[in-house]
Amino acid sequence: MNTATTLYQELLSAYNAKEQLLAVLIDPEEFNTGITTQFLKSIPEHTSHLFVGGSTVSKGKTEAVVTALKRQTNTPIIIFPGDVSQITTKANALLFLSLLSGNNSDFLIGQQVKAVSKLRGTQLEVIPTGYLLIEGGNQSAVQRVTQTQPLPQDNIQKIVDTAKAGELLGMQLIYLEAGSGAKTPVSETIITAVQREINIPLLVGGGIRTEAQKNAAYNAGATMVVMGTHFEERKTP
């Protein structure tokens, strides 16, 4: 397994320089590779990364989407997997997610163990990421698939402590996620509280659709904002 951290070093540099990164999340199950060019033209020019993944994705679709994107852009492509089946070595990196907010051992360590055989001997950059599902006002696909409960937004100390525990366990990123299509994004108060406690880059996603919401997350302390549904709704059929 190759654990070179070229992309992670860039993320860490952005964190230290207080730069603002934007990742656009693409769900392979919803993406039409035939409009890849149009889609890439529709996203912001300052998009720094493309995330590819979803809670449930049919076999082979993730790799097909990554391959189509690689033909059209040099923007780094990072796999944001719902499970081990979505891993493809065609991407630049993999968020090696551990669902810290839930009590389902399969998504805490089980899927990760299964991934090792796929990653052994590859050049795919693996970035250990502590993933926290935060209540977003509706039942998210992550909640349904993992059969776990999100952390309530009013329990800020529990969220902060969980994020810090992830850092102490050796996670290189913390990802606060309200879930795709969330009615309520992760609050600025939560983002600021977590950012003050940890010393690694903070990613925030779920329910962020407007410039105001995006800027609010940055101002609160997010190194990277992840937007997905907003752009999926705009893509050409």
Image (tube, rainbow, N blue to C red):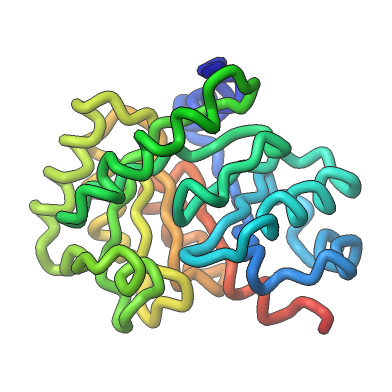
Q: Name above or below for residue 178 compared with residue 113.
A: below
Residue located at (52% from left, 18% from top): 1
Q: Position of residue 113 (x, y in %)?
A: 35, 34
Q: Is residue 153 left or right of residue 173?
A: left
Residue located at (36% from left, 44% from top): 111
Which image quarter: residue 74? top right
Q: Is residue 160 left or right of residue 214?
A: left
Q: Is residue 185 left or right of residue 14?
A: left
Location of the C terminus (image quadrant): bottom right
Q: Position of residue 206 (x, y in %)?
A: 44, 67
Q: Position of residue 210 (x, y in %)?
A: 56, 73
Q: Name above or below for residue 37 compared with residue 92.
A: below
Q: Name above or below for residue 40 compared with residue 125.
A: below
Residue located at (30% from left, 63% from top): 146
Which image quarter: residue 7? top right
Q: Is residue 61 left or right of residue 129?
A: right
